[in-house]
Image (cartoon, helix red, strand yellow):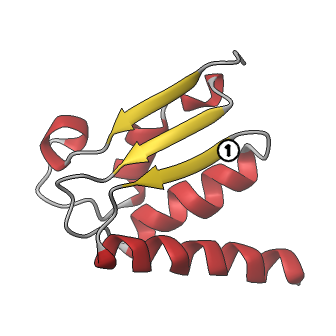
Amino acid sequence: MTGSSEALLVSNQEVTGADKLVSRSQAKRVTARLDRFKEIVLDFRRVDTIGPAFADEIFRVFQRAHPGIHVRWVNAGPDVERMIRRALAAGAAAEDT
């Protein structure tokens, strides 16, 4: 793992080639090879919505598998922000059990 930080543009067409970011497989494509970095910045500019599976895969599953990596996000609209917060809450609840 390097000390680098990466800004990743999460754009429907540029990253996944799909109209919507909804699936775990799309999230896995986004996070592929990101385990090389200590900080990941996800830029949700031009992304109107994300699905719960997409959010869960990045913000709960990926984060749990890589606790030394700090994942943050910028430019998230209200719908995207709500899905991210939901995934984070599910991750926190799972840690409490």
- The vertical placement of 26 against 68, above or below, is below
Please indicate whether residue 72 sits to the left or right of residue 14 in the image. right
**Disc 1 secondary structure class:** strand
* Residue hosting label 1: 70
Residue 29 can be seen, yes or no = yes
Is the N terminus in the top left, top right, bottom left or bottom right quadrant?
top right
Q: Is residue 38 above or below residue 18?
A: above
Residue farthest right in this picture: 97
The spot of residue 97 in percent (x, y) is: 88, 84
Determine the residue positioned at 55% across, 30% down: 34
Q: Residue at x 41, y 73 (%)?
A: 81
Residue 97's place in the image compared with 70, above or below, is: below
Q: Amino acid at mark 1?
A: His
- Nearest to the observer: residue 17 or residue 5: 5
Q: Residue at x 47, y 53 (%)?
A: 73
Query: Where is residue 68 shown, x and y percent of the image?
Result: 79, 40
Q: Position of residue 94 (x, y in %)?
A: 77, 78
Give the class, few, some or many, for how many residues have Cα within 10 Å of label 1's Cα (few <14, many ≥20). few
Q: Quadrant of residue 29?
A: top left
Judged left or right of residue 21, residue 71 is right
Q: Most extreme residue toward the top, as rendered? A: 2
Q: Is residue 23 left or right of residue 89?
A: left
Task: Using the rendered view, name the quadrant where residue 54 is placed.
Answer: bottom left
The x, y position of residue 93, in whole percent, is 76, 83
- For the point 67% across and 52% down, the residue is 63
